[in-house]
Image: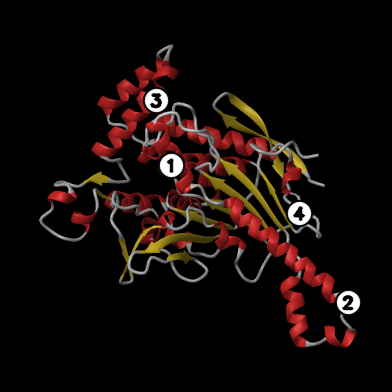
């Protein structure tokens, strides 16, 4: 049973009732955040919904923009996390004054929905040409005209503004305090291997989060302790396996927040092809990971069934006891949220940093998590014989 209470929170339409959820006991409550650039505001909306429901993840794992969101959450006082996230997104989605007027006029037109595709494309072009305040700025001269080697010759944008933003909004002493575990993935440029920077193993600095989001050739590789790193999404765009494969195994409730959907419609033109290609390329392969977990669960159950038939003296053997411990049940519940692209969004949706798009993405995340938590039974621990369950409000029938 869940103990629920109602609280009133501010919303765009006024005060609304939100239920506070007493989550069943799990050793780990993880928030897993995929990469996806401007779409990452969806994750901020999901976090706001978790926060208002009283759910506090104790492990944040992110790739790329997911790593930046994780930094802001873990590096802020608990009561200020949503406000800091909003300040981060308002900062990096700021529009110059001469562009802002055009945006407000477009949104006011009665046929604005018909113009949204062109409007978002304009926001993307603005990001490409002018960069985004507090995030990245164009290099001049561009890399193909650079007379020098290094960052100026290997990337189109300078991400120094992002470091300044992180240092302003993130308390790295708090982030590394151990109150919340943080893991972010990046790719070693020299070896090609995906590595995780983890507060359980080292002190994380701004460059670890910048490395996780250093997608070439837009952004430069980030140096950390003599090695150079690119965006972790080049190898795996989700850190879900990092959480599920950690040792020792523990009972875990995971909120997996994806920004790209593996499923989609057949493209009808080249713009659709480019958009669908990105969806497939960067979708997290969550299904493959969960299918693997289900197979492992079946194997553990088979081992337990087999060991029930062993003689007592054999069961006491240290090697058999070790196998029994490996086969012991752990509860894994994955609550999966996937951003659902709008019809007017195209292949540039991950760098459409306009304020209007950002707020829509944020609200979509907030709506989806509220809808998910409307039935708190989705957070229940799975039955021992199952050990592993997944939920996705966009694909499942209502919980019975």
User: In the displayed structure, does residue 71 sit left or right of residue 118?
Assistant: right
Q: Position of residue 333 (x, y in %)?
A: 69, 53
Q: Classify mark 3: helix, strand or loop.
A: helix
187 vs 69: above or below: below
Q: Quadrant of residue 395?
A: top right
Foreground mark, 2 or 4, reads 2
User: In the displayed structure, does residue 11 sit left or right of residue 114?
Assistant: right
Mark 4 sits on what residue? 381
Residue displayed at 87% across by 80% down: 310
Mark 1 sits on what residue? 277
Q: Please tell me how crowded label 4 is: few (under 14), some (14-19), or many (20+) other residues with Cα within 10 Å.
A: many
Q: Earlier in the sequence, mark 3 or mark 4?
A: 3
Q: Position of residue 60 (x, y in %)?
A: 54, 56
> Label 2 vs label 4: CA separation?
28 Å
Q: Please tell me how crowded label 1 is: few (under 14), some (14-19), or many (20+) other residues with Cα within 10 Å.
A: some
Q: Classify mark 1: helix, strand or loop.
A: helix
Mark 2 sits on what residue? 309
């Amino acid at each position: 049973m869940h103990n629920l209470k109602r609280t009133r929170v501010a919303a765009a339409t006024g005060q609304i009732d939100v239920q506070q959820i007493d989550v069943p006991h799990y050793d780990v409550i993880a928030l897993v955040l995929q990469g996806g650039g401007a779409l990452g505001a969806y994750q901020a909306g999901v976090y706001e919904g978790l926060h208002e429901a009283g759910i506090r993840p104790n492990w944040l794992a992110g790739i790329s923009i997911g790593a930046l969101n994780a930094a802001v959450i873990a590096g802020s006082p608990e009561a200020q996390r949503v406000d800091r996230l909003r300040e981060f997104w308002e900062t990096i989605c700021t529009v110059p004054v001469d562009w802002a007027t055009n945006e407000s006029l477009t949104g006011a037109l009665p046929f604005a929905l018909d113009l949204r595709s062109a409007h978002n494309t304009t926001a993307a072009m603005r990001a490409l040409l002018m960069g985004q305040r507090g995030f990245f700025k164009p290099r001049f001269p561009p890399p193909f005209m650079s007379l020098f080697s290094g960052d100026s010759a290997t990337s189109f944008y300078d991400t120094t503004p992002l470091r300044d933003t992180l240092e302003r909004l993130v308390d790295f002493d708090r982030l590394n305090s151990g109150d919340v575990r943080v893991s972010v993935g990046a790719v070693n440029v020299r070896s090609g291997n995906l590595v995780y920077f983890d507060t359980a193993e080292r002190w994380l600095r701004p460059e670890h989060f910048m490395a996780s989001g250093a997608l070439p050739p837009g952004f430069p590789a980030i140096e950390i302790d003599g090695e150079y790193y690119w965006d972790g999404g080049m190898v795996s765009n989700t850190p879900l396996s990092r959480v599920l494969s950690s040792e020792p195994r523990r009972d875990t409730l995971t909120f997996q927040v994806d920004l790209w959907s593996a499923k989609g419609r057949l493209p009808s033109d080249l713009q659709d092809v480019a958009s669908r290609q990105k969806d497939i390329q960067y979708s997290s392969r969550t299904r493959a990971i969960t299918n693997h977990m289900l197979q492992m669960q079946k194997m553990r159950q088979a081992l337990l069934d087999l060991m029930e038939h062993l003689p007592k003296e054999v069961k006491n053997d240290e090697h058999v006891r070790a196998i029994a411990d490996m086969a012991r049940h752990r509860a894994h519940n994955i609550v999966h949220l996937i951003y659902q692209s709008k019809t007017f969004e195209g292949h540039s949706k991950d760098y459409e940093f306009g304020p209007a798009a950002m707020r829509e993405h944020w609200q979509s995340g907030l709506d989806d998590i509220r809808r998910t938590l409307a039935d708190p039974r989705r957070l229940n621990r799975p039955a021992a014989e199952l050990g592993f369950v997944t939920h996705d409000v966009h694909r499942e029938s209502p919980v019975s």
